[in-house]
Amino acid sequence: MAEIVIKGVAKRFGGFTALHQVDLAIADQEFMVLLGASGCGKTTLLRIVAGLETPSQGEVWIGGRRVDHLPPRDRGIAMVFQNYAVFPHLTVFENIAFGLHMKKLPHQEVDRRVNRTAELMHIEQLLRRYSGQLSGGQRQRVAVARALAMEPDVILMD
């Protein structure tokens, strides 16, 4: 994992200020939880770190490199969304492998990573099932396995 540094980040949507001058440092290997009321900006901050939103001002650094100008794919981040964001028309194996195929990894490496993360998440018996056949908890584990399989510098979970 990598250190995350957020410096003076603000986000405005029209006349509404969602984030105001956020400063935050999360050390390498640190596990951090953001707590707050619904609508207070937690998801907006995660989306800015992931590159899914652009800050109105401020900087985002990951692993000692400024990333707020980079697209999401170049930030070394995997994100797990609160709605799981798994593809119901794909099997669990295909869901976990999706990003690995997008990176054009060799099939042998894809198989290794999918099987390793499925075992880690205790879902190896589900690999041939379609995600639409899974419980909510099982779909959440598939989403986490998909993030872990990418071997990112940072995993964000909303």
Image (cartoon, rainbow, N blue to C red):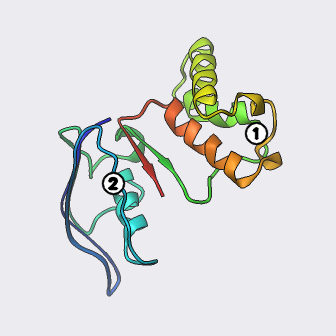
> Dot 2 surroundings within 10 Å: few (below 14), some, or many (20 or more)?
many
Q: Residue visible at 57% across and 37% down?
A: 146
Where disc 2 sits, the SS reads: helix
Q: Is residue 76 depicted above or below 137 in this figure? A: above
- The location of residue 49, given as percent across then percent down, is 33, 54
Q: Is residue 17 above or below residue 21?
A: below
Q: Residue at x 76, y 29 (%)?
A: 125
Instruction: Answer left or right for 41 relative to 57.
Output: right
Q: Amino acid at mark 1?
A: Leu
Q: Position of residue 90 (x, y in %)?
A: 76, 39
**Going by the image, does 24 lie left or right of 86?**
left
Task: Look at mark 2 in the image and give the residue it sits on.
Answer: 49
- Numbered circle sitting on residue 43: none
Total residue callouts? 2
Image quadrant where one finds the N terminus: top left
Q: Secondary structure at mark 1?
A: loop
The percent coordinates of residue 25 (x first, y second) are: 20, 53
Tell me if mark 1 has few (under 14), some (14-19) or many (20+) residues whose alpha carbon lies within 10 angstroms of its own. Answer: some
Going from N to C along the chain, the mark reached first, 2 or 1, is 2
User: Against 56, is 145 above or below?
Assistant: above
- Seen from the viewer's position, the closer of residues 29 and 49 is 29
Snapshot quadrant of residue 28? top left
Amino acid type, label 2: Val
What percent of the width, then of the height, locates residue 140? Answer: 63, 49
Q: Quadrant of residue 58?
A: bottom left
**Distance Cα–Cα, label 2 vs label 1:** 28 Å
What residue appears at the point 65 percent right and 33 percent down from the top-left corner? 122
The residue singled out by tag 1 in the image is 90
